[in-house]
Amino acid sequence: MTFRQLGLSPQIIKACEDKGYKAPTKIQEESIVHLLRKKDLLAIAKTGTGKTAAFVLPLLQDIENQKKVQDNENIILTKLIIAPTRELVLQLEKSIKSYSKYLDIKMCSVYGGANIKPQIKKLESKVHIVIATTGRLMDLIKKNKINLTKVDTLVLDEADSMLDMGFVSDIQDILSTLTSLQQIILCSATLGPNIKKLSSQIMTNPKIIEIKSNDRVNDKIEQIAYPVTLEKKLEMLSYLIGSKNMKQVLVFCKTKANAEEIVKNLKLDGLKAASIHGDKTHGARTKAITQFKENQIRVLVATDVAARGLDIVDLFYVINFDLPFMPIDYIHRIGRTARAGKNGIAISLLDEYDIAQIREVEKYINQKIPQLDLEGFEVGTRIKMIATKKIVETKDDIKRKKTSGAFGKKKKRKEEKKIAKQRGKRIIGQRK
């Protein structure tokens, strides 16, 4: 099947050809005609399946169809897209602009962490599409600065993430304002019980399209894990980046505090690095991402939520400094590499607290991740035995050994740094 057979305009088809699209992907083929009929859709698909185009292209076509029967000068907001993070909102805006490059379609992105006044001004100038985070959209609704009464299509992108972040009540409040709503499109990476419950509450006989794969993980990604002691984790990170001559690497960690600590120590090792996380302003996050894309910095350190929606062209390396709490987030993390049919490498650094979690990840993705020793960073007998399941570390074991700081005991490190300062030296993560 071709894009023309799906009922798309020559302008939209030309934009797709400019992006190198030869034919619709499976999800696009199954979604576009259905959505042009103004029917509800529940799309379950992972990154790289063409999911965004599957809902954006029919939205653009519908706007063009509406313009033909309405006054072309009368711009009406009819399409609302909601995403969990500002990074994903901006990525969606970029995608929509590329697909609508030959169309006269106006759009506006609204998100927190940025001045609301320019966003209000843009809305006042009239737009066809709004892409929003829930928080900023709720602010605009409360201030009576956005008119949603003519919105006929609502898209909830990465709905599973929105539910995980606790946005259910906001979604329901927003829905109550959409008095002309005809169609809901819900996109998710997984079809869990929460997604099923939400779809049953807000959708009418939705078509369910689930793009299944025998492998949960892109087979273009080479996965490697290196066991390492907690004390040498920072040192290993810098060593890997330097020894493998990684020109551009995205590093993931679980907490904001860890992200800052990692960046600080990478800089001390002479590596240009920056972080993105929830405590950073929108301007700071945008600057860091831009610098990373333009190779002005070598390492971008991110928390899971902050990195959602990141699309870095030709990114080859992803490193998990620690493993995420949820196995699904492991897939989201390493999915930043090997995009558009290219290859990539995902490396996980495993201290003794990550060993149990790597087993959960392997079970979830139905793959065994090779664990390799790195010369100079060989681990002790205990962690090897934990890794090979010869002994099982209990919660009590971990609790007794658990440290109060991000990478060790704060008090001990403070004393060590004080001594090191007096000697004119620096201590990083208790390195030898």
Image (tube, rainbow, N blue to C red):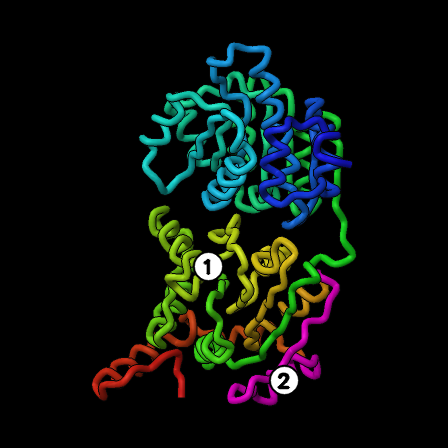
- Label 2 crowd (10 A; few <14 / some 14-19 / many >=20): some
Amino acid type, mark 2: Lys
| Closer to viewer: mark 2 or mark 1 | 1
Q: Which x, y percent locates residue 393?
A: 62, 77
Q: Which x, y percent locates residue 30?
A: 75, 36
Disc 2 to disc 1, C-alpha distance? 28 Å
Residue plotted at (41% across, 51% down): 278
Amino acid type, mark 1: Ala
Residue plotted at (64% across, 78% down): 371
Quarter of the image containing the C terminus? bottom left
**Is residue 90 something one can see in this rendering?**
yes
Dominant secondary structure of the magenta stretch? Answer: loop
Q: Is residue 390 magenta?
A: yes
The image quadrant of residue 123 is top left
Magenta-highlighted residues? 364-391
The image quadrant of residue 397 is bottom right
Residue topped by disc 2: 384
SS at mark 2? helix
